[in-house]
Image (cartoon, rainbow, N blue to C red):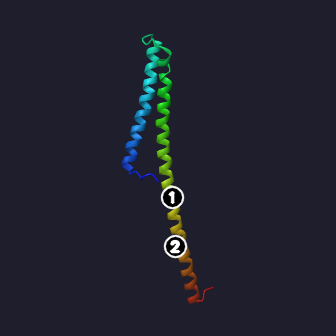
Amino acid sequence: MPKELTREQQEFRSRIYGAIYWTSLAAILLWYVLKSAGIIQTPLWIELLPIAFAVFGAGAVLQEMRSDIRTLKEKTRSLEQNTHHVEFAMHHLENDMHQVKARLDLR
């Protein structure tokens, strides 16, 4: 099972993934602008670099989504446990109420 990350570690990772994503988009935009202006005249393999940048940026977005999903799973698990505790407490309250009614003969 993966190690639980602290809130600070999650935020740091989120900032890193965001930086990777925006850097990838900026690199693609810069490349297209320079290519359109005729400044960059490149062989085919270099023309495919924007695709690599896009894939790298998409990977960063997916990592961020995985982190968000992990956080949602943790919060859902916590809600399940809290709901169980509330149900348990309600059950005991109902039993106590039945005992009080029985003692007071209020059925």
Amino acid type assigned to the residue bearing label 2 in the image: Ala
Earlier sequence position, callout 1 versus callout 2: 1
Classed neighbour count for the residue bearing mark 1: other residues with Cα under 10 Å, few (<14), some (14–19), many (≥20): few
Residue at horizontal 48%, vertical 59%? Answer: 78
Q: Say which quarter of the image contains residue 90.
A: bottom right
Q: Where residue 57 sits in the image (x, y, percent)?
A: 47, 32
Q: Is residue 12 above or below residue 51?
A: below
Q: What residue lies at 50% left-to-right and 30% top-to-bottom?
A: 55
Front one among 32 and 101? 32
Q: Would residue 39 appear left or right of 97 to someone viewing this image? A: left
Residue at numbered disc 1: 77
Residue sitting nearer the eye, 105 or 18 = 18
- Local packing at callout 2 (Cα closer than 10 Å; few below 14, some 14-19, many 20+) is few
For the residue labelled by badge 2, is the local secondary structure a helix, a strand or a loop? helix
Residue 33, quarter of picture? top left
x, y (%) of residue 7? Answer: 39, 50
| 92 up-or-down from 66: above or below | below
Seen at 53% across and 77% down, the residue is 92
- Name the element at disc 1: helix
Which residue is label 2 attached to? Answer: 89
Residue that lies at the very extreme toward the right in this rendered image: 107
* Picture residue at 41% right of the left edge, 29% below the top: 23
Q: Position of residue 53 (x, y in %)?
A: 47, 27
Q: CA distance from mark 1 to mark 2?
A: 19 Å
- Where is the C terminus found, in terms of image quarters? bottom right
Q: Position of residue 44 (x, y in %)?
A: 50, 16
**Residue 15 vs residue 85: left or right?**
left
Identify residue type, mark 1: Arg
